Amino acid sequence: MRETMPQTPIFSSMLGSSCSGQVQPDMGERCVDPVYQDGNLVSGSLEALIERLVPTMDYYPDRTYIFTFLLSSRVFIHPHELLAKVGQICIKQKQQLETGTEAEKAKLKSFAAKIIQLLKEWTETFPYDFQDEKSMKELKEIAHRITQCDEENGTVKKIISQMTQNLLMALSARSQYQEIREKFRQPVTDKGTILKSKPQSTQKDILSVCCDPLILAQQLTYIELERVSNIYPEDLMQIVSHMDSLDNHKCRSDVTKTYNLEAYDNWFNCLSMLVATEICRIVKKKQRTRMVEFFIDVARECFNIGNFNSMMAIISGMNLSPVARLKKTWSKVKTAKFDVLEHHMDPSSNFCNYRTALQGAAQRSQSAHSSREKIVIPVFNLFIKDIYFLHKIHTNRLPNGQINFKKFWEISRQIHDFLTWKQVECPFEKDKKIQTYLLTAPIYSEEALFIASFESEGPENHMEKDSWKTLRTTLLNRA
């Protein structure tokens, strides 16, 4: 089940005249605490920022603010504690409106509708904030009080009931995903599998399953989008909160917090190792050359699709030492296309070429009319590093103790871009046979890759000869 983000675009004017995306509300004393620069909210105490989150009769927070504050708040306060504070503010406002006149009753209904809208956005965007009993209890408490605002007709009750049902479904879908995920693939180390004792014809390889680079790139994109759809904004925020939060402020156990990120990172590593395995285990140079050229074409198709993560994984696999050292093989490869790919992924100037290509794909996605043109899958470990860098160069709090909200605007903008990209429906049909191979075919350990590489093309110098001798002895001794 895919997570639904607010329907109206957010962040469109975040760096414009007002970070909040609307005129500051007339909130009396409350505007003294949050600090604005050129109309942009840049800092504030936690209490003032919480008050800004809660609607009033005349005010509803902009969705950009709701998303940014709810995302960043977990660094400073547990979701159930935040819900409790929101509930307390709601009670105060409700009491002020309960004078009994018809006009006040109408205001009370309007206020109730706004609170429900806030809770709806919260539960849809950050369902995992409600996975523990404390948070669910606080949610039910607020919902119960809001229901009292409009008891004559059951509309409010129905909306809250539907919201709760959707929330439970989202939580259930996420927990099921974690349970059914395959275990991380362990590299092959068995000597019988690695040493080339089997006839080449009996060994299945990727080309026997799919020989069309475009189709393989599409299936890789399908796998990427499936995995990326299970990464949530709060998972990404762990990069900040996991390191900085006090133990009693951590939202979940360490395993749960990092699971989705680790699983996706593991996919990248497995794909790199699979590429290297497919190349190194081929005995004949001509077939090995064909395999290298095939993966170059697959990487190029991934680039054209906008799937930069798979492209980078394939290039990484071909740049691993056991593959890179196969000079006789590479001498037969037409490397012009590979050189272009490496140019796009050149790490100099902070991956400037890649970032230009990513920006181009993002612009194409914004104006696209088809799902194919909307696909943007960034290099995930670079995306994570960017968030980490933003976190490290800016403090969470300013010297006066206020929250450095300017920092969290920027982090949440980057995370929101990622969430927009992950919601693209995959336009390619699933090919079970190809995907099964990609996800389950044996992959070699680094040690095993070197052995296979040396068997394909013998060691060329004393250092390689010593390595080969040591590896072979180690492997045979394990038998």
Image (cartoon, rainbow, N blue to C red):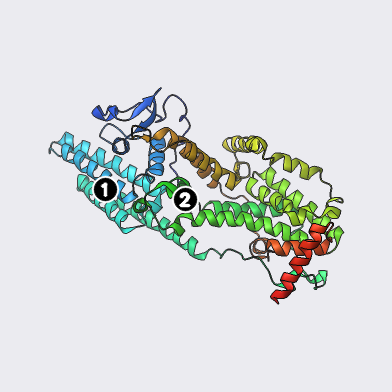
The amino acid at mark 2 is Asp
Q: Residue at x 71, y 77 (%)?
A: 479
Q: Position of residue 66 (x, y in %)?
A: 38, 39
In this rendering, is residue 303 above or below 29? below
Decide if residue 204 is in sight here.
no
Residue at the spot of label 1: 84
Q: Is residue 225 left or right of residue 29?
A: right
- Of residue 14 and residue 263, the one placed in the foreground of this image is 263
Q: Residue at x 35, y 28 (%)?
A: 35
Q: Mark 1–mark 2 contact, CB under 8 Å?
A: no
- Of residue 415 and residue 460, the one placed in the foreground of this image is 460
Of callouts 1 and 2, the N-terminal one: 1
Q: Residue at x 51, y 39 (%)?
A: 414
Residue placed furthest toward the left: 100
In this rendering, is residue 453 above or below 229? below
Instruction: Please count the marks in the image.
Output: 2
Q: Is residue 56 left or right of residue 101?
A: right
Q: Position of residue 81 (x, y in %)?
A: 29, 49
Element type at mark 2: helix
Q: Position of residue 160 (x, y in %)?
A: 30, 51
Q: Position of residue 134 (x, y in %)?
A: 29, 56
* Crowd band around label 2 with a 10 angstrom C-alpha radius: few (<14), some (14–19), many (20+): some
Decide if residue 127 is in sight here.
yes
- Of residue 225 and residue 330, the one placed in the foreground of this image is 330
Element type at mark 1: helix
Q: Is residue 300 left or right of residue 142?
A: right
* Crowd band around label 1 with a 10 angstrom C-alpha radius: few (<14), some (14–19), many (20+): some
- Which mark, by number, is residue 310? none
Residue at the spot of label 2: 235
Residue 111 picture quarter: top left
